[in-house]
Amino acid sequence: MFAAIKEQHKGVDVCINNAGLAHAEPLLSGKTSGWKNMMDVNVLALSICTREAYQSMKERNVDDGHIININSMSGHRVTPNADVHFYSATKYAVTALTEGLRQELREANTHIRATSISPGLVATEFAQRLYNPDKAAAAYTKIKCLEAIDVADSVTYVLSAPPHVQIGDVQMRPVEQVL
């Protein structure tokens, strides 16, 4: 992917790591394959894309780039739902990786910024992939959820910050969401 970006667009100035998934795999009974898939997508793929984006920026002397990790409120608290405890662990990893990235970028004397955007419940296909159709529908009808545009607007907000402003983490959730 990064070779194609380099060929078609010369490189990356902004990287938005948005891939993420969850499987209903509790800690006491979950399948290793589900845990590995969550680690591969939510942690490893994000880390690989971050590394490649930084290398692209470094090669071209881009000193004002931005790496944005779409995280989750699950990266800041653990809900009383065993189905998502492992998912939460992967999102806590994203929180730690974003802060570690920020520190490494500062140590490298670069002005490339790193931000984590942590939405709560967003009306997407996420719950439909995690649960059966009835349980997924219930998750989205109890409260007025965030919408994809709300997350996109937060990305725009972060990218529009002045170059000297580092927005570390945007935490956002529906007004009615308890956790």
Image (cartoon, rainbow, N blue to C red):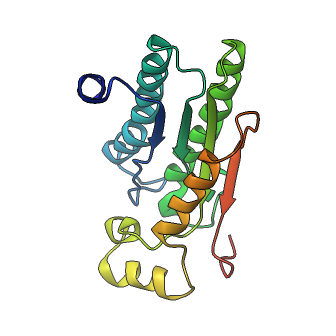
Residue farthest toward the right in the current orientation of the protein: 164
Quarter-of-image position of residue 100? top right
Could you tell me which residue is drawn at 32 percent across and 65 percent down?
Answer: 129
Say which of 132 and 126 sits in front.
126
Image-based side of 175 in relation to 84, left or right: right
Q: Along the horizontal axis of the image, is 129 left or right of 172?
A: left
Image height of 109 relative to 161, above or below: above
Residue at 49% over, 72% down: 147
Q: How many marks overall?
A: 0
Q: Position of residue 39 (x, y in %)?
A: 42, 39
- Residue 51 in the image: above or below residue 121: above
Report whether residue 72 is seen.
Answer: no
Which residue shows up at 31% across the image and 76% down it? Answer: 132
Q: Percent x, y for residue 65?
A: 55, 30
Q: Is residue 174 above or below residue 46?
A: below
Q: Residue at x 54, y 70 (%)?
A: 121
Q: Quadrant of residue 128?
A: bottom left
Q: Position of residue 26 (x, y in %)?
A: 47, 56
Q: Is residue 100 visible?
A: yes
On the rendered structure, is 152 left or right of 162?
Answer: left
Closest to the observer: 178 or 29?
Answer: 178
Quadrant where the N terminus is found in the figure: top left
Where does the image place residue 77, in percent across and percent down from the top left? Answer: 68, 56
